[in-house]
Image (cartoon, helix red, strand yellow):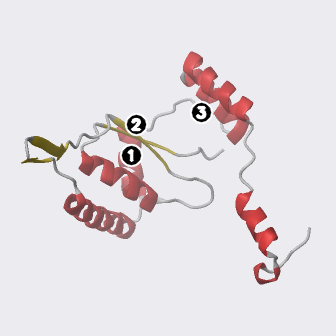
Amino acid sequence: MIIKELSQLTKDEKEGILRRGARVDVTLVKEIVESVKREGDRALKDYTARFDGAVLEFLRVSEEEFARAVDAADPAVVSEIEKAYRNILTYHEQQAENEWWTEEEGRRLGQIVRPLESVGCYVPGGRAFYPSTVLMSAVPARVAGVKRIVVTTPPQP
């Protein structure tokens, strides 16, 4: 492996680094999407075992599991998460867009604000936990009036 200081790179080398993207096997991605469309949860469980090394019985966390997790958590941590939730909620409530209309010279102009029906929030997994990612993606969706908010995170094998 060659290690270079960023300050020592030429302009072309820096541009090359910025241009390189993730190498995505588009064929594999299409295969996975089609498989999940056809087979639903069964395909999700198969891919989870294949890519994450985790065998899952259920894909959803029950209300009881949530309650047990909150009960088992450090109360000080729960309190701080609740405080962050309130702060983020207050901020986004102030930011919420409203419909407006104006008429001028025989024209009616305005903005219609409609929430999405459903939103997916991805929370990275691994060695750390990211409650801030849940809050910063799900709370604005809730304020916007999204009816269905789904949070997903990789399993721990």
* Label 3 or label 1, whichever comes before in sequence order: 3
Residue 56 shows which numbered tag? 3
Q: Position of residue 114 (x, y in %)?
A: 24, 40
**Residue under the point 66% across and 28% down:** 30
Are there few (<14), some (14-19), or many (20+) residues within 10 Å of tag 3? some
Whether residue 53 is visible, yes or no, is no
The mark total stands at: 3
Q: Secondary structure at mark 3?
A: loop
Quadrant of image for the N terminus: bottom right
**Residue under the point 25% across and 51% down:** 143
Q: Position of residue 86 (x, y in %)?
A: 25, 63
**Which residue bears the numbered disc 2?**
62
Classify residue 24 by image quadrant: top right
Classify residue 145 by image quadrant: top left
**Which residue bears the numbered disc 1?**
66
Q: Using residue 2 as the reference point, say whether residue 139 is left or right of it.
A: left
Q: Using residue 28 as the reference point, say whether residue 84 is left or right of it.
A: left
Asked whether disc 3 touches disc 1, contact meaning CB atoms under 8 Å apart, the reply is no
Asked whether disc 1 touches disc 2, contact meaning CB atoms under 8 Å apart, the reply is yes
**Residue under the point 27% across and 67% down:** 87
Q: Position of residue 79 (x, y in %)?
A: 31, 67
